[in-house]
Image: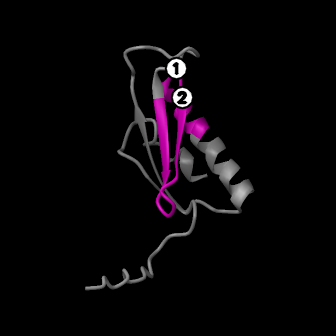
């Protein structure tokens, strides 16, 4: 018996249109650079994951902004939606700008 192909998904997102992100830490041990946190950003369309080492949770917003700017310039991709776990670092509306 031959398996039929998966149906196409009309709601498929474009690259870097929908991002998920989360912070892990603090880690028990510091990295060689002094980082104790990890910011993980995942693109829903491609499944591409990018991780960034942070010394403090407060660095996460700036790191996320730099990532979005870089992807916008490199792939001409505008981020439309972001999803996170409601951590206080991302609870502000400053990411909307």
The x and y percentages for residue 85 are 35, 45
Residue to which mark 1 is pinned? 35
Residue at figure coordinates x 68%, y 49% from the top left: 69
Which residue is at the front of the view, 23 or 95?
23
Q: Quadrant of residue 78?
A: bottom right
Q: Quadrant of residue 5?
A: bottom left
Q: Which residues are magenta?
A: 38-63
* Secondary structure under the numbered disc 1 in the rendered image: loop
Residue that extends furthest to the right in the rendered view of this protein: 73
Name above or below for residue 59 compared with residue 22: above
- Packing grade of label 2 (10 A; few <14, some 14-19, many >=20) is some
The numbered mark, 1 or 2, whose residue comes first in the sequence reads 1
Mark 1–mark 2 CB contact (< 8 Å): yes
**In the visual, does 79 lie left or right of 22?**
right
Which residue is at the front of the view, 96 or 42?
42
Residue that extends furthest to the front in the rendered view of this protein: 1
Name above or below for residue 81 compared with residue 57: below
Instruction: Give the label on residue 53, or none.
Output: 2
The x and y percentages for residue 31 are 51, 17
**In the visual, does 9 lie left or right of 61?**
left
Q: Quadrant of residue 75?
A: bottom right
Residue at figure coordinates x 47%, y 31% from the top left: 38
The x and y percentages for residue 26 are 39, 22
Let me know if residue 52 is in the magenta part: yes
Quadrant assignment for the N terminus: bottom left
The x and y percentages for residue 55 are 53, 21
């Amino acid at each position: 018996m031959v398996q039929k192909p998966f149906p196409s998904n009309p709601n498929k997102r474009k690259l870097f249109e929908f991002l998920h992100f989360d912070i892990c830490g603090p880690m028990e041990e510091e990295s060689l650079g002094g980082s104790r946190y990890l910011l993980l950003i995942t693109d829903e369309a491609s499944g591409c994951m990018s991780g960034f080492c942070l010394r403090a949770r407060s660095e996460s917003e700036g790191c996320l902004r730099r990532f979005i700017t870089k992807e916008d310039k490199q792939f001409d991709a505008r981020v439309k939606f972001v999803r996170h776990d409601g951590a206080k670092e991302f609870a502000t509306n400053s990411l909307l700008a």
